[in-house]
Image: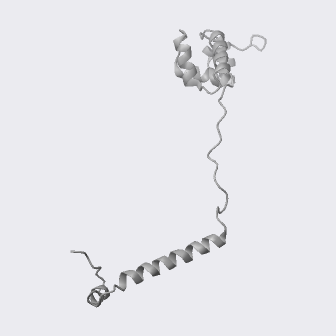
Amino acid sequence: MEGHGLSQRRACGLAGIGHSTLSYQRRRASDEAARKRLRELAAQRRRFGYRRLGWLLAREGQVMNHKKVYRLYREERLMVRRRGGRKRALGSRTPMSRCADAVANVARSVAFSWRLYCSPPEESLRSVCRRGFAPTAA
């Protein structure tokens, strides 16, 4: 900036950033101890996600926000591998000939039960059955 004869404010204005950006100092403490312990716990407990690992860290005295635990977990690429979904059968399970036999059996059983329902042995009950009422035992 000094070599070009521009002030700090003018150079930041041309670049489209605020002039206070140049004097910014990060205040975040180093997370190396937490990162190291998170990697160790994740290696021991492969099926644990970031939440359970965060709980384990809190038990050990390294209490931190769940968002920070998730950020470290993601940055270390410790994502748990997703399990596969439910395996479903492809296509039909029964051959077509069995399906046709089953349909025929159902039709036969319905016809047989209808004959039993509509043809009682006694003459007095036939008129009742023709009207659609089933005989009841008294």
* Residue sitting at x 68%, y 13%: 7
Question: In this rendering, does residue 63 appear at all?
Answer: no
- Could you tell whether 136 is left or right of 18 in the image? left
User: In this view, which residue lies farthest toward the right?
Assistant: 3
* Residue sitting at x 65%, y 41%: 84
Q: Position of residue 55 (x, y in %)?
A: 53, 18
Image quarter of the C terminus: bottom left
- Could you tell whether 119 is left or right of 7 in the image? left
Image quarter of the N terminus: top right
* Residue sitting at x 77%, y 15%: 4
Q: Relative to residue 36, is residue 102 depicted above or below?
A: below
Question: How many labels were placed on the picture?
Answer: 0
Q: Relative to residue 19, is residue 135 depicted above or below?
A: below
User: In this view, which residue lies farthest toward the front?
Assistant: 121
Which quadrant of the view contains residue 96?
bottom right
Viewer-proximal residue, 15 or 42? 42
- Could you tell whether 85 is left or right of 107 in the image? right
* Residue sitting at x 55%, y 16%: 56
Q: Relative to residue 105, is residue 128 depicted above or below?
A: below
Q: Relative to residue 104, is residue 6 depicted above or below?
A: above
